[in-house]
Amino acid sequence: MSADIDEIKNRLAVEDIISEYIKLKKAGSGYTALCPFHSEKTPSFHVSPDRGIYKCFGCGESGDIFSFVQKFEGIDFPEAKKKLAEKAGVILSDFGGGKKKEEREERKKEGERLLVLLDKATDFFQRNLLQNEEAKNYLKKRGVDEETAKKFRLGLALDSWNSLEEYLTGLGFSQEEMMRVGLIKKNESGRVYDRFRNRIIFPIFDQKDNPVAFSGRDLSGLDKVAKYLNSPETEFFDKSDILYGFNFARVEARKRGYFIVVEGQMDLVMSHKAGFQNTVATSGTSLTEKHLKNLSAFSKKLIFAFDSDKAGIEAAFRGVKKALALDFDVKILDMPTGADPADIILKDPKDWLKIVKNSKNIIEFYISKISLSDKDLKEKNREMEEKIYPFVVALNSPVERGFYVSKIATAFGVEKDYVEGELELAEKRIILERQREEKVLKTRLASVDIFQKDTIIEKIKKKILKELTAIYYWQKKLTKSEPWVEPQKILKIIEDNCEEELFQQILDLEEKQKDYVDDLIFQVEEIYNEKEKHALEYDLEEMERRLRVEAINEKISKLHKKLDLASEEEKMEILQEIQELTKKKNGFKERNNED
C-alpha cells in the first residue's frame, strides 16, 4: 500500500494536481493561491513542489495530493487514492488472492461494463435529441440552448417501445444488463420494452461524472401519463444519496460559499444557465441526511428555492428542519406566487439574480412575513407555531436561539419570557409528536416479527413472503375497482410456501395490525406506481420460482447437516438426494433464464 502511495507521488507533481482545481500563481520556488477551504481576499494558500505539500496559513489546512483531493471533492482516502492512481497510471496492489480476488475482479469488470452501458444509452438519447426538431423546439421554448443541453447531456427517448433496447443489443449488451440498470422492463409474456418513451431525458450523474440514472419529462401531454419518470434504484443509483446536478455544482459551491437547492431538473438547468452553477435539485424527493452530508463537504450554507405552492412549501419545510438540526446556515428565496425558478429565469434572468441576492434567513423570513401581514393575532399565533417555532427549536446553538427570541419579541411586540414559554410548548409538542411516531413505529415493527424469526423461515424466503403479503392486501383492497391479480391466487402462493403458523399470522394481520397492513400497501403501491398491470403477473411468477429454489436450498442444507452423523451407506443415499435436489434447483434457474 505505501509503495503504491510513493509511486503515485513520484509520478504526480503537487502543483499540477492542485492547479486542476484552483488557479495557482508562481511565487519564488513555490506557488500561492486563494485558499479553497475558507473565504479570503489575500492569498494565504502555499504550495511547495519540492516537499510535495500545501499549507494554508489562514485556516491551517495542510497536506499532500491525497488529502487535497479528499478535502476538495469530499471523498474518502481509498477513493482519492484510486482517482490519483488512474491519473498516474499506477496499478494498485490488490490484497488477498485466490477465489476472492478473482470474484472482486469479476465484480469490478461487471460494474465497469454497466457504466459503459449507461454512458452509451446517454449518447443514444443525445443523438436522438439532435435529430428531432420538435424536441429541440420544446427545449428552446423552455429557454434551454444547445450549449446548455450539451453540458447536461440532455437527450430524447423516442416514442418507440424498443429503440434503446435494440441499439444496446447491437452493441453487445444483454437484456439482463439493461434491466439491472433500469433501462428496460419485462411484461408477463416475457416481452421487454424501453422504460423511457417519448420523453426529454435528464441524465443523473455520480460524483465521478458517470451517468448512473435518468429522469424523463413526458412530451405527450396526456393526463394518464406521469409527467416525470425516474430510473428505479440500482447498484449505482440511490435517490437518497445522489442529488441532480451535484457533480456540476460542488466546486462552484465551495467558491461561492453556498448551494442553491431547487426542486426540478429544469429549474436547475436554467439556474446554471443564468450563472448560478452552485445549484442542485432534489428531483421530487425529500432532502435526506445523506444529501446534506454530501453538501456539507463543500458548504454548510443552503438557499432553498422551492415552489410557492403547498407541496413546495412542505418540501422546503422538511428539508430546512433537517438542515438546521445539522447546523446548516439556511436561507430561503421569496418566490412569486405560482412561479418556479425556470419560469422566472425564462422571463428575465436578472429577476432571478435579484431574488437570490435578497435571500433571507428562513426564520427571519417568516418573522417578517407573518408580523407584517394583515391577519389577526390568533391567525398570526397559529402561523408562528407552524412556521417559526419549529425552526427555532431545531437550532442547536443557545446563542442563536437567544438571538431569535429577541427578534420575535421585538417584531410581535411581546416579552421575551412569553416567546420562551411558547418555544417550550412547541418543543413539548414536537417531543409528543415524535413519541407518537415512535409508538406507531414500534407497533408496526412488532408485526414485522412474523417475518423476522429465523426459527420460522430463512432470510431470503421471509423477504419474498413479506412482498407477497403486501401485494395480497393491496390487491384485496382493490376488489371494488378490479384487482390487477386475483387476491386468492397470491394467497395460494403464500400458503404453499410457508408453515401453517406463519400463514395464520399473515391472515390475522388485517385485523390485529391494521396500521402495519396500511404501511405495506403504501410501500407496494409506490413500487408499482410506474409499472403496467401485466408487470405484476411477471413479478409474482418470479417470486414463486425463487420460493421454490429457497425451499430446495433449505432441504439441501438440512441434508448436509445429516452427513456428519450418517453411516457410509446413508451418506451415499444423502449425497444422491442432494444431487437430485441440486439438479431440480438448476432446472428452475434454467427455466427462468429461458423466460
Image (spheres, grey):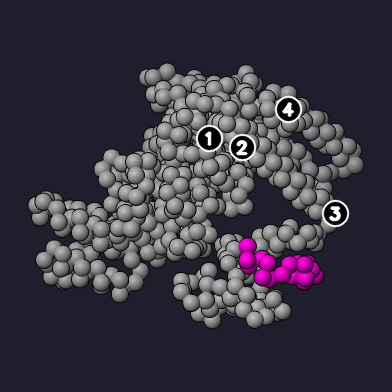
Tell me which numbered mark, 4 or 2, is placed earlier along the sequence. Answer: 2
Report, in whole angstroms, how far the alpha carbon at label 1 lies from the one at label 4: 21 Å
Instruction: Tell me the number on the disc at residue 122.
Output: 2
Nearer the observer, disc 3 or disc 2?
A: 2
The three-letter amino acid code for the residue at tag 2 is Thr
Residue 254 position (above or below residue 110)? below
The residue shown at (50%, 54%) is 249
Q: Is mark 2 on a helix, strand or loop?
A: helix
Marks 3 and 1 close (CB-CB < 8 Å): no
| Residue 228 coordinates in the image, percent (x, y) | 45, 34
The three-letter amino acid code for the residue at tag 3 is Gly
Residue numbers of the magenta segment: 1-20
Q: Is residue 218 left or right of residue 583?
A: left
Report, in whole angstroms, how far the alpha carbon at label 2 lies from the one at label 1: 9 Å
| Residue 477 coordinates in the image, percent (x, y) | 40, 26
In the picture, the quarter occupied by the N terminus is bottom right
| Quadrant hosting residue 164 | top right
